[in-house]
Amino acid sequence: MQANISVGAKHDLRKYEMITNNLYAVMLLQASKTRCTPFNTIRSEVSTIVPELFDAVELLVTLPESNLHLGVRGAIVDCYDDDGNYEVEFSDRSGEMIALCTLSTEQFLVVWKSKERHWLSVSELLTAMVARLSDERQIEVLEFARSLSGR
């Protein structure tokens, strides 16, 4: 009985993926025929959080050469407009600088806006993270969120 469920589940998963991909293609086709905006265009129009001087950021990568791991927080201390990189200072709990790194926006996520003096909400952080993903990964995140909403 379990073997049949396993085979059936794999079949259902392939069928579900095929239906999902076809539905997505139909949605894009319909959107191009009407005045609707396609999903990928909406994604590109989502406001991005622009890093600014003194914003707090969280690493999205591990930097072994600086002994910094994923999730460590630092502060932007300089912005290089010409190449889109930022100088980020990382400190220990006593405030001593442990690393100063030049990072691109793909390597960190803004978690606190200095000018507005507020932490970004979970939905803002989630939106910023999902916007970085490919369309296929975004669909996976959406499907996961749907599964959570049914609990």
Image: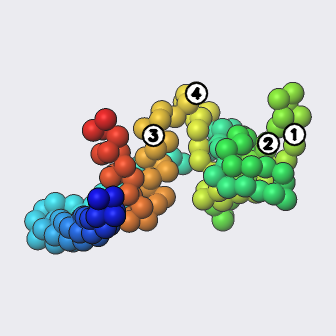
The first of marks 3 and 4 along the sequence is: 4
Distance (Cα) linking label 2 and label 4: 19 Å
Looking at the rendered structure, the number of numbered marks drawn on it comes to 4
The first of marks 1 and 3 along the sequence is: 1
Instruction: Name above or below for residue 50 compared with residue 122.
Output: below
Q: In this view, does 24 lie to the left or right of 100?
A: left
Please say if the residues under marks 1 and 2 sit with CB atoms less than 8 Å apart: yes
The first of marks 1 and 2 along the sequence is: 2
Instruction: Name above or below for residue 47 compared with residue 132.
Output: above
Residue type marked 2: Phe
Q: Mark 2 points at which residue?
A: 90
Q: Check disc 4: other Cα within 10 Å, few if <14, some if 14-19, many if 20+.
A: few
Distance (Cα) linking label 1 and label 3: 28 Å
Q: Mark 3 points at which residue?
A: 124
Question: Dot 4: what SS?
Answer: loop
Q: Residue at x 38, y 65 (%)?
A: 136
Residue type marked 1: Met
Q: Name the residue under label 1.
A: 97
Q: Residue at x 59, y 43 (%)?
A: 110
Disc 4 or disc 1, which is closer to the eye?
Answer: 1
Residue 125 seen in this snapshot: yes
Residue closer to the observer: 5 or 119: 5
Residue 144, percent from left and from top:
37, 49
Question: Dot 2: what SS?
Answer: strand
Distance (Cα) linking label 3 and label 2: 23 Å
Residue closer to the observer: 17 or 123: 17
Q: Name the residue under label 4.
A: 117
Please say if the residues under marks 2 and 4 sit with CB atoms less than 8 Å apart: no
Residue 13 seen in this snapshot: no
